[in-house]
Amino acid sequence: MSENFFGDRGFYARRARAYDAMLGSPTYNRVFWGTRPDQYAAFAARAIGSGDGPLLEVAVGTARATALLHVASRRPTTLVDLSAPMLEVAGDSIRRAAGGEVPGRITLECRDMLSPTDGRRFETVLGLGLLHLVPDLGKVFAGLGAQLRDHGTLYLASLVRGSARSNAYLKLLKSHGDIAEIRTPGELYESALDAGIGNVSVSHEGAMAYVVISR
């Protein structure tokens, strides 16, 4: 993955804590994306509650939508981001949610989500706000799919074309290099099908799409 989107020099890494506050703002999400933060959390809860085996969350960012869910879960959980500042905020979020330390079954790893350091396989892979940050969907689907166990499931979210306001803001972000591509839900569906991992479903609310691929 390009450091432009995930590295410490990127827009989001430099402004990790401000970005965390922005993500949690109902007004920001309603005005620009026609959606709500609790919808992201609901999608994450669906993923986290889908099984009890090892779970991988990639591009975890600040864990704004998932910290409480990971603490409440009993699953062995790995949280990955290429940005150390983002992971620092994520760790703080999880410690606050746990009322102390990060639970021992949760690990945070600063690395490329497509380059695991060992042969671990996961029952569930979750990526919130991910796919609009990557230029090559096929590479991401293949790389994450390779980390799935048999009968595992990918849960991936992406900003997509929506209202005129959302589209204008997406174009601005793309022009600044803060996102990689602007896609439609249909384009996500076709790319996921082409990956050949398993059954695909795509839903969307406003300018946020949710992709589920079940092996």
Image (cartoon, rainbow, N blue to C red):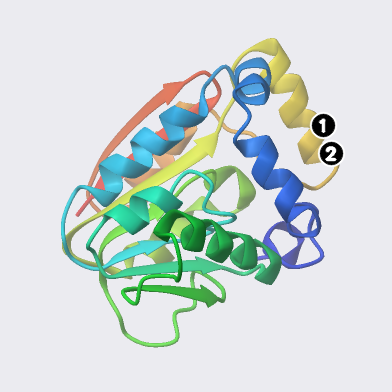
Horizontal and vertical percent position of residue 15 = 79, 53
68, above or below 112, in the image: above
188, above or below 142, in the image: above
Q: Residue furthest right?
A: 176
Q: Are marks 2 and 1 in contact (CB under 8 Å)?
A: yes
Q: Is residue 139 visible?
A: no
Q: Tell me the residue at 49%/71% (across/down).
A: 114
Query: In the picture provided, is 125 more to the left or to the right than 128?
Result: left
126, above or below 45, in the image: below
Q: Residue 175, which numbered label?
A: 2
Q: Residue 88, which numbered label?
A: none
- Of residue 78 and residue 195, the one placed in the foreground of this image is 78
Horizontal and vertical percent position of residue 184 = 53, 27
- Of residue 177 and residue 110, the one placed in the foreground of this image is 110
59, above or below 109, in the image: above
Distance between the alpha carbons at the discs numbered 2 and 1? 5 Å
Q: Which residue is mark 1?
A: 172
- Of residue 57 and residue 93, the one placed in the foreground of this image is 93
Horizontal and vertical percent position of residue 169 = 76, 26
What residue type is disc 2 on?
A: Ser
Quadrant occupied by the C terminus: bottom left
Query: In the picture provided, is 21 more to the left or to the right than 137?
Result: right
Q: Tell me the residue at 54%/43% (across/down).
A: 129
Query: In the picture provided, is 85 more to the left or to the right than 196?
Result: right
Q: Tell me the residue at 29%/53% (across/down).
A: 72
